[in-house]
Image (cartoon, helix red, strand yellow):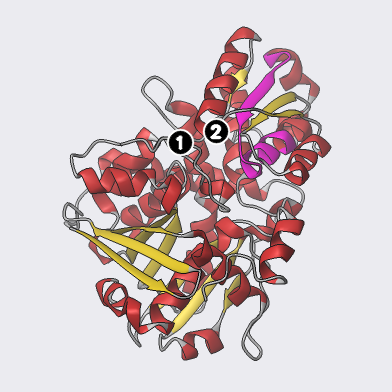
Amino acid sequence: MVKTLERKSIDKKINIRYIENNKVQYTDKNYKDIDYLNKNNLKKVFELHKSILDYKRTPLFELDNLASRLDVSKIWVKDESYRFGLNAFKVLGGIYAVASYLEEKYGEDVVSDLTFNELKCREVKEKVGEITFVTATDGNHGRGIAWAANQLGYKSVVFMPKGSSEIRLKNIKSEGAEAYITEFNYDESVKIAEEYSKDNNGVLIQDNAWKGYEKIPMWIMQGYTTIIYEVLKELEEKSEDITHIILQAGVGSFASSILGYLVNEFGSKRPLTVIIEPEKAACMYKSAFYNDNNPHNVEGSLDTIMAGLACGEPSTLGWEILNKYANIFISCSDNVAANGMRVLGNPLSDDPRIISGESGAVGIGLIDIIKEYSQFKEISEKLKINKDSKILVINTEGDTDPEAYRDIVWNGKYNIK
């Protein structure tokens, strides 16, 4: 079933579509297909991240006044803009994949024998040799790979899709990478990175998986789980739990890593999970629409302000998890994300101010719209959002393009009225 609900005004509209997953699995069992995302297998991920000198648990903000306004019990925002000073979460996956590759080349266990600093030592470098890590990115993933490679003493080359922000390009170069903006969309840029790595004896570090390329994307997914590990640890300390989680999807690696962890941890008692994407790059939504268990690509320019989600080809690993365990898939217009940026940047009363980029704010934008406007009551009901709901969203990035941020938050670009 596909539902389309739109709110129209003079020259703007909000477009939100949703699909309920009629195949979602809720039977408690041993989730062997995703055991690489269970807590026991992921202890070493957190230990590696914790061994990095600048490691700090990113803040989990409570927006109590916003929750009261929207008539829900709790809204938490996990703010990844604080992660290692890089203004985005992506480095968590990139650094773990790079470290795991070095561990495999070196032949030692990265947890029991090597900390992050020990990976920098001359003995490791001499044994593994010169390596160039290669990737394609809208910005955040590439900056994370560049930072990780530079920290550990290796080269990196980064390709960005047509229309990418010059500021994000500059940030990647500032981390020591060679970086270029191509004349192609994200998916074509991935192909360019893949060919470059083959032709130049490089190592492709990409978060989307395809047949024959799954080990490194799996490492990246494992790296992302530090986010939900930290969230659950903090909520446990407060004796709180989550009823809903909204996860944004590009290729699906981030969303599926968080959901996979929650499935392993809570089984049938896991939070209701919403997957949200920009309407012009909604490959997970399209895959759910066809309902044949296969991933489906979105073609074209993938034009959206949510640059971090502008991906047309689903990760095979990501889709496998989301297809089985996500409750609802949503695609939305860009002004939903812009609305979220303004809500977070202009808080109610003493709620904390959160500076969020386009991809990071879309979850809050969705909640605000479906609760504030009666035209979207049906979606709110489908999501079972009520006065007892305790909702977690993850701000995956800060103002990684400050000029675009100001254009939206200060100047009202992509407004909803």
Q: Is residue 372 visible?
A: yes
Residue at the spot 52% in from the left edge and 22% down from the top edge: 191
Q: Is residue 231 visible?
A: no
| Front residue of this view, candidates 86 and 410 | 410
Asked if the residues shown at circle 1 and circle 2 are in contact, with their CB atoms under 8 angstroms apart, the answer is yes
Name the element at disc 1.
loop
Q: Residue furthest front?
A: 10
Q: Is residue 338 above or below residue 23?
A: below
Residue 396 lies, in percent from the top left, at 58, 56
Q: Is residue 71 above or below residue 362?
A: below
Q: Determine if the magenta segment contains residue 143.
A: yes
Give left or right: position of 314 versus 342. left
- Say which residue label 2 marks: 185
Residue 56 lies, in percent from the top left, at 69, 59
Q: Determine if the magenta segment contains residue 157.
A: no
Residue 221 lies, in percent from the top left, at 48, 41
Residue at the spot 56% in from the left edge and 81% down from the top edge: 63
Name the element at disc 2.
loop
Numbered circles on residues, count: 2
The magenta span reads 128-147
Residue at the spot 44% in from the left edge and 86% down from the top edge: 70
Q: Quadrant of residue 331?
A: bottom left
Q: Quadrant of residue 201?
A: top right
Query: What amino acid type should be assigned to the residue bearing mark 2?
Result: Asn
Query: What amino acid type should be assigned to the residue bearing mark 1?
Result: Gly
| Front residue of this view, candidates 21 and 6 | 6
- Say which residue label 1 marks: 300
